[in-house]
Amino acid sequence: MGGKIIVFLERKPGRSNLYKVTHFHLDKLSEDERLPRSDNYEVHKDEIFDSERVVLPGDYILLSYVEQPIDNGYNRYNHPMDERTYNHFLSKYLHSEIHKQMKEAWLWKAYANLHFSQPILTDIYYERFSRHRLTSSEQNVVQQDDPEKWTIWTMWRKKFLRSTRVAPELVFSSAYN
């Protein structure tokens, strides 16, 4: 509800019982001014859902998971979807494309707030367009006009938007409720 934090979990190499937990604070840049400031911790694998280093106490809430409903045209009472189509939807059910896009827009907004002191677009854009369209327009401007900042954004995307079969917001939703 206040500052935004990304809680990042990685298995410690060679130590299968420990996870490295990193808190990236999205309100301040690190010394190299690329990634957000961070704090590191270690948590035993059996304490992942109980540790206050992973499940933050206080007014923290997870990003809401955005479901992607299946179009009724794919599954009718007189003609069910084929197995290939079913497997395609099933593989994306727990980490939908719409959720990935929303999460990227959320991350972009945090990135832009840290790396740009002025709005990227003119005020009229912010008054007229949806968040998705604004994100796309801002990214196009940065990619064309500031290659160094675009490279840093690419680094953020690679670091924070890792591909997973299940959205972490779903995995940890019960721990935060």
Image (tube, rainbow, N blue to C red):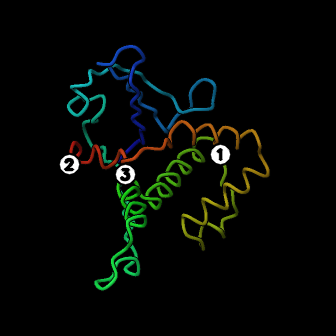
SS of the residue at dot 1? loop
* 87 and 100: which is toward the camera: 87
Q: Is residue 79 left or right of residue 107?
A: left
Residue type at the position of mark 3: Leu
The furthest residue to the right: 145
Residue type at the position of mark 1: Ser
SS of the residue at dot 2? loop
Q: Is residue 144 left or right of residue 70?
A: right
Badge 3 crowding class, 10 Å Cα cut-off, few under 14, some 14 to 19, many 20 or more, is some
Q: Nearer the viewer, mark 3 or mark 1?
A: 3
Specify the label residue 177 is tagged with: 2
SS of the residue at dot 3? loop
* 173 and 137: which is toward the camera: 173
Read off the residue under disc 3.
63
Q: Is residue 27 left or right of residue 120?
A: left
Residue for point 47% across, 57% down: 102
**Residues under labels 3 and 1: Cα distance?**
25 Å
Read off the residue under disc 1.
117
Q: Earlier in the sequence, mark 2 or mark 3?
A: 3
Q: Earlier in the sequence, mark 3 or mark 1?
A: 3
**Residues under labels 1 and 2: Cα distance?**
35 Å
Residue for point 55% across, 64% down: 132
Residue for point 21% across, 47% down: 174
Residue 34, how many percent across, how many down?
62, 32
Instruction: Find residue 72 and report its image quarter.
Output: bottom left
Residue for point 75% across, 38% down: 148
